Structures are given as C-alpha cells and as structure tokens.
Amino acid sequence: MPGDLYVSWSDYHRSIERLAAQVHDSGWRFNQIVCIARGGLRVGDVMSRIFKLPLAIIFTSSYSGEAGMQRGSLTVSKHMSMTTDGIGERVLLVDDLVDSGVTLDVVKRHIVEGFPGVREIRTAVLWYKQCSKYKPDYFVEYLAENPWIHQPFEPYDLMSADDLLKRTA
C-alpha cells in the first residue's frame, strides 16, 4: 500500500535503542517501566533490560479483524502483571506507537487512579502519528502522514499453528 511504513526487525530494534537513548539523555530518573501489551511488550522488555528496572505489563485490546487492522472499542485490563509488590513512584509508560492517543491517555489515567503512590508518569513510543490527540513525552519518529505501520511480527497475526507446522516441516 502506498504511504504505508514497513519496518524490519533490525529497524524495529534500532528504534527501541534510539528511544532508550533519548530517555536516558533526558536526565529523567524513573524507577518503574510499564508497557502496554501487546504492542508495547517488546519495547518494554528491551527498556527494562537496558535500564535494569522492573517491568509491569498492562493489557489492552482495541484492534481486531483481518491482520488486526480494524480499530474497535478499547478494553483495559483491571489488573497489572508485575513481579514486585508495588509499582514505582516515577513510571515510564511505553508502547509501540500512538495513533489516536486514546490508549496512552486512558492507561495513564488508569495507573494514576489505581496506584496512588505514583508521583509522575512519562510516556515513550517508537512512532507518534500526527493524528494523535496525545503527545508522548518521548518518541523516535513523528509521522505527519499517519501511515499504517507494518511491524515485523504482523505475519503471525495471519498464521495458525498448522501454517507454522507446514512452514517448518
């Protein structure tokens, strides 16, 4: 599709590294990373490893349909998965992209309301689309044309376990 953005695995990982460098260079010190699943899982995992900080995961769902390209209503999990007893005071909330801005805004409010010990939350994404009503604190690439982003893991959205068996046989 013309105007779409196709991202390879190497570009994807390089973007995460650039995001981590940007957060580090900002001088802001945080003590918790929360990623928005599913898109932010890989971003959160790498950031957690780089900064040596605990990772918490909050699950959301809004895209479905053929290859996950239809936006529906947003569902946010009531609970957050984490290995620590609580959440840090300064939270870096990460996701892969901000499209409409609804998910980042809703999840940020969900954290503030559900965890009164949180003093500050900043947001970080790989791609920030012009159409977003929410501007993240950190982003790698601003996309003025609002392209659909084809990420390297998307082939798995169309793959079944039987397809995988045929491919690996």
Image (cartoon, grey):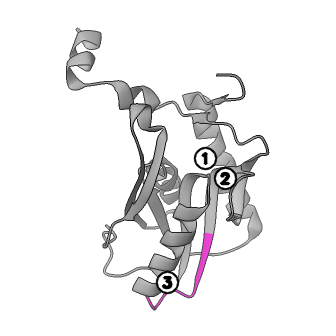
Which residue is depicted at the point 72% across and 49% down? 140
Magenta stretch bounds: 115-122
Q: Where is residue 130 drawn, in percent x and y?
A: 75, 51
Q: Which residue is mark 2?
A: 19
Q: Where is residue 27 drawn, in percent x and y?
A: 73, 71
Q: Please tell me whether mark 3 sits on a helix, a strand or a loop.
A: helix
Camera-side residue of 87 and 24: 87
91 to 7, vertically: above or below: below
User: Majority secondary structure of the magenta segment?
Assistant: loop
**Marks 1 and 2 close (CB-CB < 8 Å):** yes
CA neighbours of label 1 inside 10 A, class few (<14), some (14 to 19), many (20+): many
Q: Where is residue 17 drawn, in percent x and y?
A: 64, 47
Which residue is depicted at the point 46% across and 59% down? 36
CA neighbours of label 3 inside 10 A, class few (<14), some (14 to 19), many (20+): some
* Amino acid at circle 1: Ile
Which residue is depicted at the point 62% across and 56% down? 100
Q: Which residue is mark 1?
A: 16
Is 29 included in the stretch rendered in magenta?
Answer: no
Q: Earlier in the sequence, mark 3 or mark 2?
A: 2
